[in-house]
Amino acid sequence: MLAIPTRGISRSINEHNSDLYTMCDWIEGSVLFVDNELSSADVVETLVEGNIYGDSDMGFQMVSSAWTEIRRRQSWIGNNTPFTINANRINKTQKWQNVPDYSFCLITSLAALYPFELEQVSGHNYTEQGVLFEELIKESLEHQFKDWQFYLTGWSRKRTTQFAKKVAEIATRLQEKVGDIARWTSRNENDAGLDLLCYRPFIDNRVGIPVYLMQCASGKNWEEKLHEPKLEIWKHIIDFACCPKKAFSTPFAMEDRKFLRVCAIVDGLLMDRYRILGVSGYNKNWVSTTLASAISKKLV
């Protein structure tokens, strides 16, 4: 198995002190990238040997909960999953290279648990990671919302369009007017927290359409970006006829209570790992060849 994460899984004596979703990611990552198959007993043995649990009884309680959660995760993305799971065993059914979307989201989440180890092993580069994630969420949304349009606006070494030109392009796409950019942004502004424009135009090309301004956050500090992009600023950068909504995407998985809290903070569209991967349930090979190749090169 992968080494026990340095974050999220802690010594437990009288009560469980580990995060269930961290446990699930660790188990899934171990199967997909290392072991091919694991039994619940294998996982418990590793936890006991790693001094997380003093006895196997508590270990089996946690692993049983993890097994149930992994089953639920798999049900959200249909038949195109890289695992099969029964009462006490999980088996890999596909190589990680054949599921680049799943592999990328999982390894990105694991990187937050192994900050130094994964950087050293995979040459982890957060700028490149961010670009790949923005492209992944764009392709996912294009398949799930076929009559919508999407425009990548986040800055990167590959996308160096000046901010004023990006704003002009956004305004043109939405049939809106450019506002006072200089007053509401700094001189070296790159994207003002906006990574992806999502909108559904009508044939009349008039304003008053569904518009989401999305932040794509793939780093371990993703929760610090929940308030981006700031609509209070964007309504001045562009003179919107009606205010757009926020959207937020992240490759991390969230338990239900946290998902609800994040929904309330975003107050708009929320795309977590399994909403992004949900397209796999009805479109197995949805990731473009170009993006799949870039992800594979990143993860090798």
Image (cartoon, helix red, strand yellow):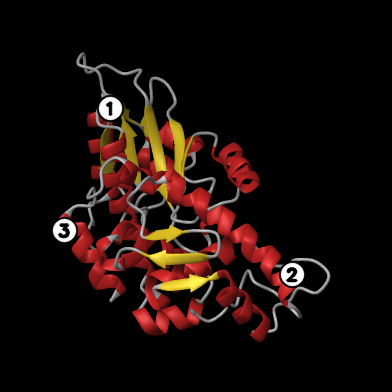
The residue located at (31%, 40%) in the rendering is 141
In the displayed structure, would residue 1 be above or below residue 24? below
Residue 118 appears in the figure:
yes
Q: Earlier in the sequence, mark 3 or mark 2?
A: 2
Q: Nearer the viewer, residue 247 or 117?
A: 117
| Picture quadrant where residue 243 is located | top left
Question: Which residue lies under the disc numbered 3?
Answer: 290
Which sits in the foreground, 46 or 280?
Answer: 46
Image point 68% across, 81% down: which residue?
48
| Label 1 SS | helix
> Which secondary structure, mark 3?
helix
Residue 278 % position (x, y): 38, 44
Question: Identity of the amino acid at label 2?
Answer: Met
Query: Percent position (x, y) of residue 159?
Result: 23, 56
Residue at 22% x, 60% y: name it: 292
Q: Residue 5, can we see it?
A: no
Give the quarter of the figure containing the C terminus: bottom left
Q: Decide: is 74 above or below 121.
A: above
Q: Which mark, by number, is residue 58?
A: 2
- Name the residue carrying label 1: 174
